[in-house]
Amino acid sequence: MSSWPPNSTEEVPGAAARGATAPDAASPSAGPFPRITLRVTREPGSCRVEVADRDVGIPPEDLERVFDPFFPGANGQLYPEATGMGLYLARAVCTGLGHALAITSERGRGTTAAVVIRTDTTTALRPAVE
């Protein structure tokens, strides 16, 4: 079995993870940047990449719909630039490539996005949108 990727966990300032240099007043995370935890683990036939924050989290009533097109959720509705398309498109790309994307969140504690990347190449690509 290959040694890539190594199982690892690293915590970085949210600003570094986003490539930002200063707080953005229009961001839900205005003020001190939340810490971002990056975790990579190997699983049989796949690699799991998790990105977790300790920010406002997603309200439980929104969690079921975060992958719906044009659904910005309660947090996104506070910002006019939110389109509600980001997670929809991210999941469509992952699905089209034979990967998986999942979100877990707890309001007031943070959100974790997990991408499971297939490492076996025997699976045919799936349609991005069904």
Image (cartoon, rainbow, N blue to C red):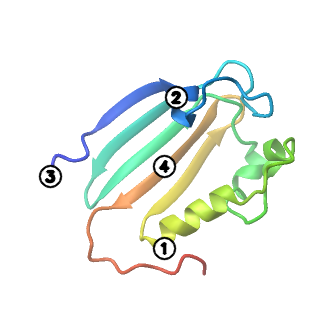
User: Rounded to the nearest whole Å, what is the CA distance between mark 1 and mark 4?
Assistant: 16 Å
Residue 10 in the figure: left or right of residue 56: left
Q: Element under label 2?
A: helix
The disc placed on residue 114 is 4
Compare marks 1 and 4 and give the one earlier in the sequence: 1
User: Rounded to the nearest whole Å, what is the CA distance between mark 1 and mark 3?
Assistant: 25 Å
Observer-side mark, 4 or 2, equals: 2
Compare marks 1 and 2 and give the one earlier in the sequence: 2
The residue nearer to you, when weighing 93 against 73, is: 93
Compare marks 3 and 2 and give the one earlier in the sequence: 3
* Residue type marked 4: Ala
Residue density around tag 3, few if under 14, some if 14–19, many if 20 or more, within 10 Å: few
Query: Residue 106 appears at what percent x and percent y?
Result: 66, 37
- Residue shown at 80% from the left, 42% from the top: 75
Query: Residue 51 appears at what percent x and percent y?
Result: 50, 40
* Residue type marked 2: Ala
Residue 5 in the figure: left or right of residue 79: left
Compare marks 4 and 2 and give the one earlier in the sequence: 2
Residue 117 in the figure: left or right of residue 89: left
The disc placed on residue 96 is 1
The residue pinned by badge 3 equals: 2
User: Rounded to the nearest whole Å, what is the CA distance between mark 3 and mark 4?
Assistant: 21 Å
* Residue type marked 1: Gly
The disc placed on residue 34 is none
Query: Residue 65 appears at what percent x and percent y?
Result: 73, 59
Q: Are marks 1 and 2 in contact (CB under 8 Å)?
A: no
Query: Residue 9 appears at what percent x and percent y?
Result: 36, 31
The residue pinned by badge 2 equals: 16
Q: Are marks 3 and 4 in contact (CB under 8 Å)?
A: no
Observer-side mark, 1 or 2, equals: 2
Q: Element under label 3?
A: loop
